[in-house]
Amino acid sequence: MLTPLAEVTNLTKRFSPDSPPALDNISLKISSGQITGLVGPDGAGKTTLMRHLVGLLHSDSGAVSVLGMDTVSSAPAIREHVGYMPQKFGLYEDLTVQENLNLYADLCGLTKEKRIGSFRRLLEFTSLSEFTSRLAGRLSGGMKQKLGLACALLGEPRLLLLDEPSVGVDPISRRELWKMVQELLDGGMGVVWSTSYLDEAEKCDRVILLNEGKTLFEGKPAELLTEMRNRVFVLYGADAGDKRSVLTDLLNKDEVSDGIIQGSGIRIALRKGAHMPDMADCLRAEPVSPCFEDGFIDRLGGGPGGHSPLADIINEKPDSDGSVIEAKGLTKQFGDFTAVKDNSFSIKRGEIFGLLGPNGAGKSTTFKMMCGLLQPTSGSAEIMGLDLKTAGSEARSKIGYMAQKFSLYGNLSVRQNLSFFAGVYCLNKAEAGRAADEMTNVFDLGSYIDTNADTLPLGFKQRLALACSVMHSPDVLFLDEPTSGVDPVTRREFWNHINSMVKKGVTVMVTTHFMDEAEYCDRIGLIYRGENIASGTPDQLKASAVTESLTSPSLEDAFIELINRSEAGRTQ
Amino acid sequence: MNFRRITALVKKESRQVVRDPSSILIAFVLPVILLFVFGYGINLDAAKINIGLALEERGADGDRLAAAFINSEFLNVRTAADRRELIPEMDAGHIRGIVVIPVGFSTRAAFESDSAVIQVITDGSEPNTASFVYNYSMGIWRAWLSQYAVEKGIEIKMPIETEPRFLFNPELKSRYFLLPGSIAIIMTLIGTMLTSLVVAREWERGTMEAMMAKPVTVTEIILGKLIPYFILGMGSMAMCVAVSVYFYDVPFRGSFVVLAVVSAVFLIASLGQGLLISTLARNQFVAAQIALITAFLPAFMLSGFIFEISSMPPLIRGLTYVFAARYFVADLQTLFLAGNVWGLLITNTAAISLIAAVFFIIIRIKTKKTLD
């Protein structure tokens, strides 16, 4: 094996003496000519590890060396050879593309002659040549990401560190960036790519899987997948209305370590050495190739099981044949800009509907109009037959809303958050007390009841956020990117709760750009440039995107294909 | 230290200043507004005070005194036959004082002229104005008295004649000392507020982290911030001085070179404070709060700019010594109104330098090139 570009030995780091370590005895090697994936959910310690590699943080114990030099004592020398792209890309938004490049070139000490060539090559490489005079702040997410990469590549580093380069970037740009980074490897560069998307891990040459500061796995992705071989199946044949109950039953069986809804099928992973459990005759199991997430969950000892105590306290929602949520010709204009154009859909009782689309496509705008946070320019949004325009507050009392990033009050305790939201939903004192107690029991928040929301572990934050949005037992639940960045176990737990509510007739609407999340939906509306360009079940969308070269597209493939078709339609 | 890296950082910062409307606002628009406010809006002079005059006795002597009040260029007089008519006016705040020419005034005047007393009632809720009313009334009464004596050919024994002469600001125009003082406020704003905000912004946007991962030293990053804002602050100062001297006709009796030196020293102290705040606060909101409390408000209230330091309680007076603005305001007022008073200028500027040195030593110790 080649001498490693960077080596970390027994690295431990704590940010405060009484908190659990951010990094716990981590050892790893990074080789040149490879992409090393630093994979794990938010709070796993990815950024902390990256910062150690450029000497921005100093370890409590253990050593970090890059190119044979210690990152504490030789930080300046190391920085000459390391390109680092922090989260948010580290760009000056009020400088133009060219000015950003000039600045970083000067800081890297690139000479005049050298930089002309570098700039031309990098601008070509990132296809930003036409945009050199545009302010970085006016670039799209994908373009910012490319410019950030270009700035990190100035000075021809031997080690390139990319901290979550794919956050907030749509799948198309993610794929482009991935291709670009792969080209860099031929020159012998070593790349570290951190991500919370487990599907990206499979494409890396080597992977370090982190969870809560500990290494769960280190090695080739295939090795992790090998362990899972012949243990992952997709079950078909469950009735659409029934699949959630089937999943719950399966998850409660000892043989099954993990399971999720995937379109019309149910994907399950068996425990090591376990046999396929007994199940209804109508189901047929098809073996599928395992993915990285299966391995991750397995390493953590399996998923969270299927039971959600939330199901026991949610009251059965009234039957209704019509639609619970209905958008009719929803349009929103901001000045000249049409954010949402003539969007119509209807969602039935007990259905999960997903709005899927790249950033800036108008899904959040649509979403906000549906929960009455924005007034549509034309068209109408109705909840259980009530127009949000005319019967706003009555309609809103039937809605539960969970905003992106949870939006809890960080400096209030769990108890205070619950009692605040009870107040917001106008529960009277007795009801509020009862609801808060129930939520505390259901979500097992008792041990954290007096802890401030800010300091809760991520999984508990997620639970609290959901608790706060369902404590008034809403008929309709709106979820805005509910599980982005959350670890797979917490995500499964979350969807167990949602599934149990749906079984009681709660109607759910989700926005997401996470493909896994989209798979949980009964139906999806694909939003692009403000228009609903395709809608249907996940399987229908996949089927509609079948091409000669791609016979069984994933949902992400379908997403990209459908958007490309829509683009092609526009340019004609 | 690498000269090219510093140049690159300075260039970057300057571009950001030019493109960021809030920097321009703080450096050039705000000073103009402040100067306008201090030049016209705030006026500590008592021009034309409204008073009431109660003519409780009508006689030739009393009427002549009344005429003297009415003709005064400092007073707006409302007359009445009885003080009781004027009390409600005073309660309502329409008049700031009442002068009563009492019954028996003329008789007393004829008998022994300096026993011809009047009563002055003032509104103590505004002590400054109250003392103006009192002083003006006394002046008018004395003038009347001496003229009366001359006419009657009698000699009045005045206890002591005072003949005031106001040095440096003979017209006692408050604008003359407010405008120089406001330059200190503006430079505090640029040096401390703006600087701490722009550094905090770099933390917020993640650019500081990118910068630190480059082969750049701490000194270079600090200089890259200091130089542009130093130039901006000096430019803004020059503008303020020009507006004060040429537009508001504030006299400038010192030397411009000395002014430049003193201002530069103060600006460096301000910048030091701004940088120090930004090493403590990595978000703009907190940085703005700290800058407001530790720099802007003291520069306003504890510098002697508006409130005189000598009339503060001892504890607060002691506190003023740690703020550079205190010394700078005194320097500015001296340079504008008195001239190059070397003793005062040197002591004060030395004090500012000391404060600046303390800031930079703490910065040097506190700033490590890590994110810990």
Image (tube, coloured by chain):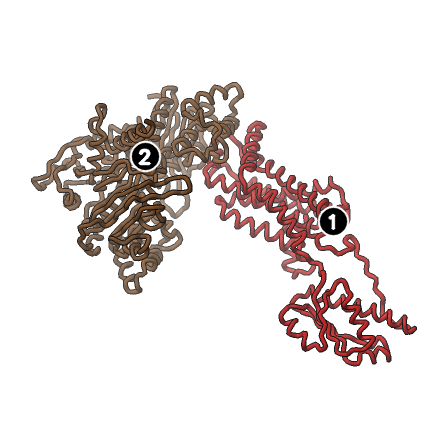
Q: Is residue B324 visible?
A: no
Q: Specify the chain shown as brown.
A: A
Instruction: Give the image location of residue A420, x and y in percent.
Output: 35, 58
Q: Which mark is residue A503?
A: none
User: Left or right of B221: which side holds B259?
Assistant: right
At 58% from the left edge and 45% from the top edge, which residue is drawn?
B192
Badge 1 sits on which subunit? B
Check disc 2: other Cα within 10 Å, few if <14, some if 14-19, many if 20+.
many
**Residue position marked by numbered label 2 in the rendering:** A39
Residue nearest the viewer, comparing B209 with A246: A246
Residue A542 seen by the camera? yes
Number of residues whose C-alpha sits closer than 10 Å to that of mark 1, classed few (under 14), some (14–19) or many (20 or more): many
Q: Which mark is residue B334?
A: 1
Q: Is residue B145 above or below residue B172?
A: below
- Residue A472, picture quadrant: bottom left
Q: Amino acid at mark 1?
A: Thr
Residue B34, above or below B16 = below
Q: In the drawing, does residue B188 fall left or right of residue A542?
A: right
Q: Residue at x 79, y 67 (%)?
A: B139
Residue B259 x %, y %: 71, 42
Between A391 and B302, the residue placed more toward the observer is: A391
Under tag 2, what secondary structure? Answer: strand
Q: Colour of chain B?
A: red
Are the residues under marks 2 and 1 on the same chain? Answer: no
List x then y, in percent, for residue A239: 13, 42
Q: Quadrant of the N terminus of chain B?
A: top right
